[in-house]
Image (cartoon, grey):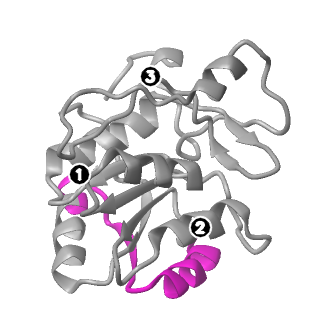
């Protein structure tokens, strides 16, 4: 794993199960992240989000927690203080269709359970290194969905094309609407600062 200094990053975990919250918290602590807030429901999570203003959100998506609606609320609600925050969806749903559903809601990265330290770190690393502009349209607001390849650790092990036919055609046209780079607040990409990675 890369040696990024993550101790200044604040994280909001939204997860209904105590055991999973404990595992994720312990993994984040191993990364040096201690500024963590925890919610057991999407409603509690959004309330905390409006007060806590985290640098990163980790949200469950399961039958007992509608992570997709939670992501949509963060991206599109007028009460959202930071619709650009990176969101990693963590779920037992392991089909590529579920990944696309989360992507279309505005998630940044997707992690299939069980959660492992190296896989969670890879998602955080992707948030840091693979900066993506935000795109706003009539039906979508979130990171540009035209990224061709996605990190995926579900049942289908091959790498998938992350574009529909219409999205491929749109690639020839410039982006419209409000756009913004995606990443942690105050974080300088390694390619633009001296010394590179920590």
Q: Secondary structure at mark 1?
A: loop
Quadrant hosting residue 190: top left
Q: Which residue is mark 2?
A: 53
- The relative height of residue 130 versus residue 42 in the rendered view (above or below) is above
Distance of mark 1 from mark 3, alpha carbons? 18 Å
Q: Which residue is mark 1?
A: 31
Q: Position of residue 118 (x, y in %)?
A: 16, 43
- The relative height of residue 141 versus residue 19 in the rendered view (above or below) is above
Q: Which residues are magenta?
A: 28-52
- The relative height of residue 58 versus residue 191 in the rendered view (above or below) is below
Location of the N terminus (image quadrant): top left
Who is closer to the viewer here, 148 or 83?
A: 148
Q: Is residue 190 left or right of residue 151?
A: right
Q: Mark 1 or mark 3: name the one nearer the start of the chain.
A: 1
- Pointers 1 and 3 in contact (CB under 8 A)? no
Q: Secondary structure at mark 2?
A: loop
Q: Is residue 194 visible?
A: yes
Q: Is residue 71 left or right of residue 166?
A: left
Who is closer to the viewer here, 153 or 168?
A: 168
Q: Mark 3 or mark 2: name the one nearer the start of the chain.
A: 2
Query: Who's the residue at 62% across and 64% down the image?
Result: 72
Q: Which residue is mark 3?
A: 190
């Amino acid at each position: 794993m890369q040696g990024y200094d993550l101790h200044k990053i604040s994280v909001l975990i939204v997860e209904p199960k105590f055991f999973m919250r404990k595992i994720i918290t312990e993994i984040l602590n191993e990364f040096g992240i201690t500024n963590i807030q925890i919610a057991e429901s999407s409603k509690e999570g959004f309330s905390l989000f409006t007060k806590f203003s985290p640098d990163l959100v980790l949200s469950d998506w399961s039958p007992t927690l509608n992570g997709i609606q939670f992501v949509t609320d963060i991206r599109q609600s007028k009460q959202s203080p930071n619709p650009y925050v990176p969101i990693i969806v963590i779920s037992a749903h392991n089909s590529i269709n579920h990944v696309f559903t989360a992507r279309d809601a505005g998630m940044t990265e997707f992690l299939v359970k069980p959660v492992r330290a190296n896989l969670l770190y890879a998602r955080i690393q992707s948030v840091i290194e693979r900066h993506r502009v935000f795109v706003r349209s009539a039906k979508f607001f979130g990171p540009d969905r035209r990224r061709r390849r996605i990190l995926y650790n579900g049942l289908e092990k091959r790498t998938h094309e992350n574009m529909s036919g219409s999205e491929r055609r749109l690639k020839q046209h410039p982006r419209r609407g409000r756009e913004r780079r995606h990443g942690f607040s105050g974080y300088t990409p390694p390619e633009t600062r001296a010394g590179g990675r920590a």
